[in-house]
Image (cartoon, grey):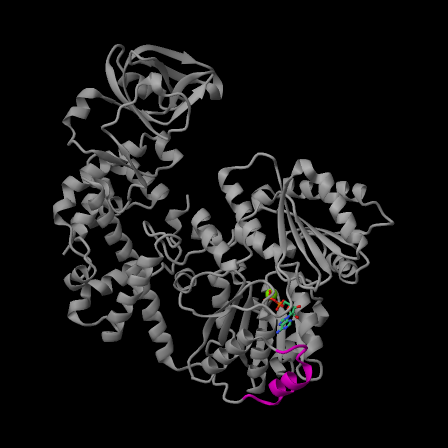
Amino acid sequence: MSQPLDNDIKFLTGVGEARANLLRTELGIRTVGDLLRHYPYRYIDRTRFYRIGEIRDDSLSYIQLRARITGFQHAGGGAKKRFVATVSDGSGTAELVWFKGIGWIEKQLEMGREYIIFGRPAFFNGSLSLVHPEVESTLAQQNRPAAGVQGVYSTTEKLNNKRLGTKAIYNLVCNAWALAGERIAETLPQRILEEYRLPSLRDALHDIHFPENDQRLKAAELRLKFEELFGVQLVILADRQQRVGKNNGFLFTTVGEKFNRFYSERLPFPLTGAQKRVIREIRQDTATGHQMNRLLQGDVGSGKTLVALMSMLIAVDNGFQACLMAPTEILAAQHFATISRLTEGIASVRLLTGSTRKKERTEIASELLGGTCDILIGTHALIEEGVQFRNLGFVVIDEQHRFGVEQRAKLWLKNDSPPHVLVMTATPIPRTLAMTLYGDLDVSVIDELPPGRKPVRTVHYHDSHRLRVFGFIRDEIKKGRQVYIVYPLIKESEKMDYKDLEDGYAGITQAFPPPEYVTVVVHGKMKPADKEYGMNLFKSGTAQIMVATSVIEVGVDVPNASIMVIESAERFGLSQLHQLRGRVGRGGEQSYCILMSGDKLSAESRKRLGAMVSTSDGFELAELDLQLRGPGDMTGTQQSGLAFDLKIASLGKDGQILTLAREAAEKVLDDDPGLSKPENRQLRELAERYRPQKVMDFSMIS
Ligand code: ADP
Ligand code: MG
């Protein structure tokens, strides 16, 4: 039975072919149902009219005026060509400005007539202007159903320019409701609606667009968020049931000689309780016959590498090979140095990165196929097709947020059955959230730092206090300490960032002149050999200062470095700042993290830097990060982040609903794993709707 919600949006009154294309490419809206699922992101009081005279600044994001047109004017030329209508409401005058669609708008407006004007206030040369406002005759307003508040819909600049601004979208939603509103089929079973006291889909969709009061709006939000998170959890948990049910995981039955030798002869220090617990969890996982898919969270410096190494040794003891993939060459090289040193004479370890020479590559390839290489460490060079193992059984991915889902999938294909996977991250995120972010993963947490760590002291200075900071650094260097100075590197402005770094370096060498001071530079654009040279100078203590981009964000381990200076700290995200801070505080000395920023800061930046100063708890910071930035950004720019497309629920703010939804999904699947019972038909469809699209939808890329 075809539903009115499935109707192509182009047949809706007010849309047509051209607008339908735009709505699809800009907002992903294809059907009437998609439009009704395009929820307002906030509401404005449409009963409230402002007087022009009372608007004094641009702090309001929208205003509604009732004013009469008193003049027209064409102004500017070229790109600045614009059409200006002057309006007055007796309390003052304002200018309505159009840069595009001038011919059309000019025909709509009538001198002397009163209009309802809706838009964002701005001030130019002291006078109030509204650029590309929505304008409607007072007559049209009278014909519309009275609603106290009206939804504000997200739109894009392109849509706005084609007269599909937020209010036009609202009008389309009204049309969609008139067409389909009373024929919306329920997507949740009655028993779930009752158990969780949720309104019907029909009521929820009505109230989310046309709320009569706050209470109904809240109920609608709850219902729609619940449905969304419930759908996602159904998908995740069903996949998990399938995987665990398959029983095709490699069996690691023994803890053998290599593991035991390492444990008794090589372990440089006693394991922390948390490390032991996680190793036990991994042991248990890999002895069940199910394929392990585990996320290991542990704050920076919590000792994840050792857990990875010991797990890999278990694999090797059971006749399998293992590999560890790191996001940067520096980190891979460092893991290789640590691990090959610790396992010398126990396991054969190799390093493979983009800069490995051809001859060595060939050697590695044959050792991998011959089975003489036990552990392969490297960068994403590991996942290239040419890299073939004899029997890969265990894969570790370090600092997961740098890798996409696809890259992980490639590793799965390196053996007949997928190897066990351990994903390690220093970004602590709540368990249910981790599952929603990364799909079907079990989660282990190292919640204990190795003993003897002193908390890093964090301070924030404005650029104008640079000299004081330099003085402090000089004192610390005198005491024999080393210093990192980090510059942001953000893809979009790479050129500028390198210039910042170079200027910074020049400034540093002036303030810390050789030969008394040795400063090295390390960044991603350098040749690997140069990078390594710089790193080694720093590691050996020859250089006291390392100027770097955020390439050192992950993994660099120099215990004697006790000062981390982060330049333009306001440009980093919270989790990144926390990661960087984790580079110091590894030795016995008091360490410092110095956040440098411009003098003027946005409210959000101030919050971020303030949080860094006030806490060193990674979980707390991650929670805050999520709230400040949203989950999409949290995983870094290299990965879109969320495996699931959430329209209304916020992972940062709706944790409680997520927990409810998860419980509900567990209950349903326990009772009916395949969702094949007739009473679960709706849920099967719901899960289908939330299953991530495997195939790229190219029509979405414009
Ligand atoms: P991360 O979790 O950030 O990857 P690492 O594995 O790099 O942390 O460990 C950080 C530092 O702590 C390393 O110098 C490592 O040798 C040390 N370390 C790890 N485990 C312990 C432990 N149980 N006791 C003392 N030091 C440890
Ligand atoms: Mg690490």
In the depicted view, which residue is nearer to us: 573 or 197? 197
The answer to whether residue 503 shows anywhere in this view is no
In the image, is residue 634 part of the stretch drawn in magenta? no
In this picture, is 70 found above or below 459? above
The image position of residue 107, as x and y in percent, is 28, 17
**x%, y% of residue 60?**
37, 29
Q: Quadrant of ligand 2?
A: bottom right
Asked if residue 531 shows in the view, the reply is yes
- The residue lying at 58 percent from left, 52 percent from top is 577
Question: What quarter of the picture does the N terminus occupy?
Answer: bottom left
Question: Toward which corner of the image does residue 53 lie, by quadrant?
Answer: top left
The prevailing secondary structure element of the residues shown in magenta is: helix
* Residue range (magenta): 255-270
Relative height, residue 670 to residue 586 (above, below)? below
In this rendering, would 237 be left or right of 75? Answer: left
- For the C terminus, the quadrant is top left
Q: Horizontal and vertical percent for residue 531? A: 73, 57
Q: Position of residue 7 (x, y in %)?
A: 20, 47
